[in-house]
Amino acid sequence: MLHLSDAGQDALQELFNIGMGHAAASLERMLGTEICLSVPFLTLLSAPRAATRIETPDHAEVSTVRQAFSGPFSGTALLIFPETNCVELIRTLVDDAVPLETLGELEQDSLLEIGNIVLNACLGSFANLMQKEIDFELPTFLRGSCRNLLASNNTSAVDEPLIFLEVNFNSREGTAASNSIKGFVVLLLDARGSADLQQELQHLLGGQV
């Protein structure tokens, strides 16, 4: 079972913040507007508790980009947005003037591209620090109940903790006020992946994990 000390959890969050900085730079180049991504919150949660944190009272459905990866540790990464946040994100990052009825056509392609950038950058920060490579499968788009999606993608025990991150997406156009949209990154690791991750963090922190 995955277990991290406070030092290990802090190090993991800092690595994700570094990755988010790289992702923001890539999105800025793609979209031509200032983007800021941050990870204000990282914890270990079971799949049911993670779903409870993500779901909203009015929207149990989520839009998700799923990407499997392998390397110094292996698993599956998910970038998840509640349905309302997903619409806001697409309108903010793509074009505020896009009619709502057109968003459905743009949503899947836009989220796949955003998810590919964010997840690759997040995990790439590990690879760079460890001087190792992480290989990614092609991302896929999923929509449905958050509980069902987490359960169907989680190959470990139900109570096995997931790495759960809140991610703030902020964009600023000129002098306009910054718009903040919350998404979530979830890392699903099996027993081998959890052990490998803890070993890599131990190397980075001198055994303090």
Image (cartoon, grey):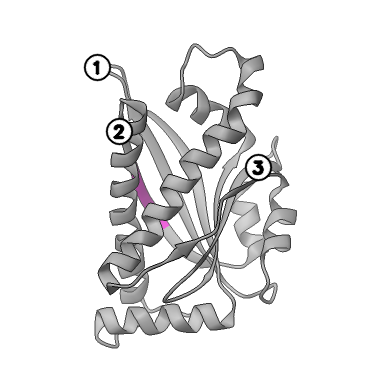
Task: Tell me the distance, in whole angstroms, between the alpha carbons under discs 3 and 2.
Answer: 27 Å
Label 1: few (<14), some (14–19) or many (≥20) C-alpha neighbours in 10 Å:
few
Check disc 2 and give the amino acid type: Arg
**Residue 90 shows which numbered tag?**
none
Residue 120 percent coordinates (x, y)? 42, 54
Residue 136 percent coordinates (x, y)? 49, 60
- Helix, strand or loop at label 2? It is helix
Q: Earlier in the sequence, mark 1 or mark 3?
A: 3
By secondary structure, the bulk of the magenta-drawn segment is best described as: strand
Residue 188 percent coordinates (x, y)? 57, 66
> Is 165 placed above or below 99 here?
below
Q: Nearer the viewer, residue 31 or 155?
A: 31
| Quadrant assignment for the N terminus | bottom right
What stretch of residues is rendered in magenta? 37-41
Look at mark 2 in the image and give the residue it sits on.
29
Residue 140 percent coordinates (x, y)? 62, 48
Look at mark 3 in the image and give the residue it sits on.
62
Residue 73 visible in the displayed image: yes
- Helix, strand or loop at label 1? It is loop
Q: Quadrant of residue 154?
A: bottom right
Q: Identify the residue shown where x is 49% and y is 11%.
A: 97
Q: Is residue 208 left or right of residue 45?
A: left
Q: Nearer the viewer, mark 3 or mark 2?
A: 2
Q: Is residue 74 left or right of residue 6?
A: right
> Is 77 placed above or below 56 here?
below
Q: Earlier in the sequence, mark 1 or mark 2?
A: 2
**Residue 175 shows which numbered tag?**
1
Check disc 1 and give the amino acid type: Thr
Task: Tell me the distance, in whole angstroms, between the alpha carbons under discs 1 and 2.
Answer: 19 Å
